Amino acid sequence: MRKLLADNQYHKIEIVEGVLVSTWKSAFIDLTIAQKMVDGRLEVTKGKKYPFLVKIDALSEITQEARDFFASRDAAEDVIIAAICATSVLESFIANFFINVNKPFFHAEIFTDETI
């Protein structure tokens, strides 16, 4: 079952079989956009924790400040564990860099398929 929770210019947030799914729409993400995305996610989760799938298909550039923020405890407030769906070489590079350099507060894995 798929339920749409939010849809804005930065990402779409859904619940799919108990997993929170964020489909990113922005090709560029800076700290301001990252904060808006997390605020929007926290608004719809209302303190409930979820496994989290992030689909970064549209992403081509993300600033260091945005990566640092996404890796922080504040950004991980409602995340139990994260899966990053990276379907291109660039997306895989960005996701690997995020996990290995920014070291997110939550456990994260990279997948090439979004199947839940």
Image (cartoon, rainbow, N blue to C red):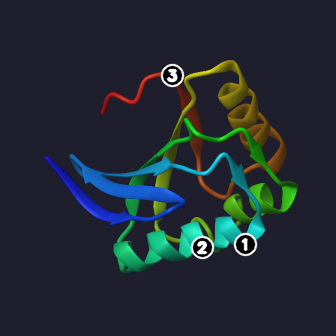
Q: Residue at x 43, y 23 (%)?
A: 113
Identify which residue, 55 or 49, lies in the foreground.
Answer: 55
Badge 1 amino acid: Thr
User: Mark 2 vs mark 3: which is more N-terminal?
Assistant: 2
Q: Position of residue 42 (x, y in %)?
A: 46, 75
- The amino acid sitting under disc 3 is Thr
Q: Residue at x 57, y 29 (%)?
A: 86
> Answer yes or no: do the residues labelled 2 and 1 have beta carbons within 8 Å?
yes
User: At x 48% / y 73%, what residue is drawn?
Assistant: 40
- The secondary element bearing badge 2 is classed as helix
The secondary element bearing badge 3 is classed as loop
Distance between mark 2 and mark 1 Cα atoms? 6 Å
Crowdedness of circle 1 by 10 Å Cα count: few (<14), some, many (20+)?
Answer: few
Asked if residue 4 is positioned above or below residue 116 in the image, the reply reads below
Mark identifier at residue 112:
3
- What's the residue type where badge 2 is placed? Lys
Q: Is residue 99 above or below residue 110?
A: below
What label sits on residue 32 in the rendered view?
1
State the residue position of label 2: 36
Residue 73 visible to the viewer: no
Residue 90: horizontal and vertical position, in percent?
Answer: 72, 26
In three-dimensional space, the C-alpha distance between marks 2 and 3, rounded to whole angstroms, equals 26 Å
What whole-number distance in Å separates the C-alpha atoms at marks 1 and 3?
28 Å
Does residue 14 appear left or right of residue 61 in this picture?
left
Question: Do the CB atoms of the residues marked 1 and 3 lie less than 8 Å apart?
Answer: no
Residue 42 appears in view: yes
| Residue 51 rendering spot, x and y as whole percentages | 40, 52
- Nearest to the eye among marks 1 and 3: give it: 1
Label 3 crowd (10 A; few <14 / some 14-19 / many >=20) = some
Front in this rendered view, residue 8 or 89: 8
Q: Nearer the viewer, mark 2 or mark 3?
A: 2
